[in-house]
Image (tube, helix red, strand yellow):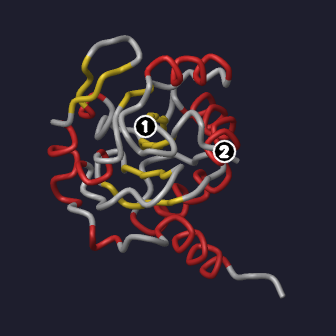
Amino acid sequence: MPMNPRSVLQLIAIMLCASLPLTGFAAADTAESAGKIRLQGLDGRQHALGEFLGKGKWTLVNIWGPDCPPCKDEIPELVLFHEEHKDTNARVLGIAIDFPSFGYANKQAVEKFVEDYLVEFPVLLSDSGISRKLGAGVLEGLPTTFMFTPDGRLVAKQVGAVTREIIEKFINEYEALNGKRAGETVGK
């Protein structure tokens, strides 16, 4: 029996929001408070997350580790999503941490991973504390993905790998329910 569109939307929302209720996010001040967080980039400079959030595009913040097997499987999907959407309505920001310790990322290991996997999106370095700083509680596993709306509100969290298709479907369904931005559709 085929699923109706509302059931599909509910399933997607459950998949992307499974481990943290939306009411658990400090949505009203996410962009402002997250914008003050500063992390080192692979370029050696400190970057405020405000450089990436609330700038009129969906921002997918992906926390991963270079030695994390599911992260290695997921990264090609994120690279493709970023490449297809960076100039229009969405982008990816990677935050690397150490795996399995969840400690501070090893810059050399992250640089090698970025080179090996042809990662073109920005990558910052941190530890598992970044999840709390983003207002999303304890980091439960890797990879973990956070979805920020174009105005910088944290609206979803997924522990475990995501695909380009899941991300695109989530954005389209979210905008359909909450008022799509003029003339935009993500993906096909």
Q: Position of residue 79 (x, y in %)?
A: 62, 32
**Looking at the image, residue 13 lies above or below residue 159:** below
**Looking at the image, residue 72 lies above or below residue 182:** above
**Residue where numbered disc 2 is placed:** 69
Q: Amino acid at mark 1?
A: Ile
Q: In this rendering, would 122 be left or right of 161?
A: left
Q: In this rendering, would 47 be left or right of 99?
A: left
Residue at x 53%, y 74% (from the top left corner): 14
Q: Residue furthest front?
A: 101
Judging depth in this view, the residue of 83 and 79 nearest the camera is 79
Residue at x 28%, y 13% (from the top left corner): 45
Q: Amino acid at mark 2?
A: Pro
**Residue where numbered disc 1 is placed:** 97
Q: Quadrant of the N terminus?
A: bottom right
Label 1 Cα crowd, 10 Å radius (few <14 / some 14-19 / many 20+): many
Label 2 Cα crowd, 10 Å radius (few <14 / some 14-19 / many 20+): few
Query: Residue 23's quadrant in the figure?
Result: bottom left
Judging depth in this view, the residue of 138 and 156 nearest the camera is 138
Query: Residue 130's quadrant in the figure?
Result: top left
Mark closest to the chain's N terminus, 2 or 1:
2
